[in-house]
Image: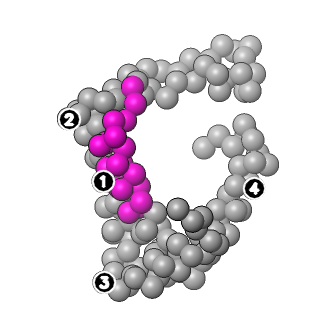
């Protein structure tokens, strides 16, 4: 598959964004799509069982450096997505990206530029980018 060129995804989304041109429609669809990502992940656990979530408090030794913390932090996810669940979660994330690009387009923002700025900020702040 060819690499997506700069701005082409956002441009394509903008071209096909006919039914939901209102920013209010797009915002509600974006919120709905994020909820669908969360629901898809929950179903991977509760219906399929390909992954499980085992969460507990993260504990860090006081003498541990921030760089060392990454090696002990847990994701709380056990297992791996099966092919079916992977496809579903990818589809839902794709829909979320669609509505995120639509939001940027309707506000006359360049999603690629936003991604570049965020990448630079994260790269500059490194481990201090704790959000």
Which residue position holds label 4? 120
Which residue position holds label 3? 19
Q: Residue at x 33, y 68 (%)?
A: 29
Query: Between marks 3 and 1, how big is the CA–CA gap?
Result: 20 Å
Magenta residues (range): 79-96
Dot 1 and dot 2 residues touching (CB under 8 Å) = no
The residue sitting at the right extreme is 124
37 vs 89, nearest the viewer: 89
Tell me which label, 4 or 2, sits earlier in the chain.
Answer: 2
Image height of 96 relative to 83, above or below: below
Secondary structure, mark 3, is: loop
Q: Residues within 10 Å of mark 3 (few under 14, many from 20)?
A: few
Within the magenta stretch, is there residue 85?
yes
Percent coordinates x, y for residue 24 in the rendering: 36, 77
Q: Quadrant of residue 16?
A: bottom left
* Left or right relative to 23: residue 105: right
Which residue position holds label 2? 47
* Left or right relative to 8: residue 84: left
Secondary structure, mark 4, is: helix
Secondary structure, mark 2, is: helix
């Amino acid at each position: 598959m060819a690499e997506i060129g700069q701005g082409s995804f956002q441009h394509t989304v903008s071209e096909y964004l006919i039914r939901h041109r209102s920013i209010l429609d797009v915002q509600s669809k974006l919120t709905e799509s994020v909820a669908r990502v969360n629901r898809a992940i929950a179903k991977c656990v509760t219906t399929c069982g390909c992954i499980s979530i085992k969460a507990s408090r993260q504990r860090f030794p006081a003498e541990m450096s921030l760089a060392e913390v990454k090696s002990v932090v847990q994701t709380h996810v056990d297992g791996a997505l099966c092919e079916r669940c992977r496809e579903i979660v990818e589809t839902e994330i794709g829909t979320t990206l669609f509505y995120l690009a639509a939001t940027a387009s309707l506000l006359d923002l360049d999603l690629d530029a936003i991604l570049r700025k965020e990448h630079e900020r994260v790269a500059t702040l490194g481990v201090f980018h704790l959000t």
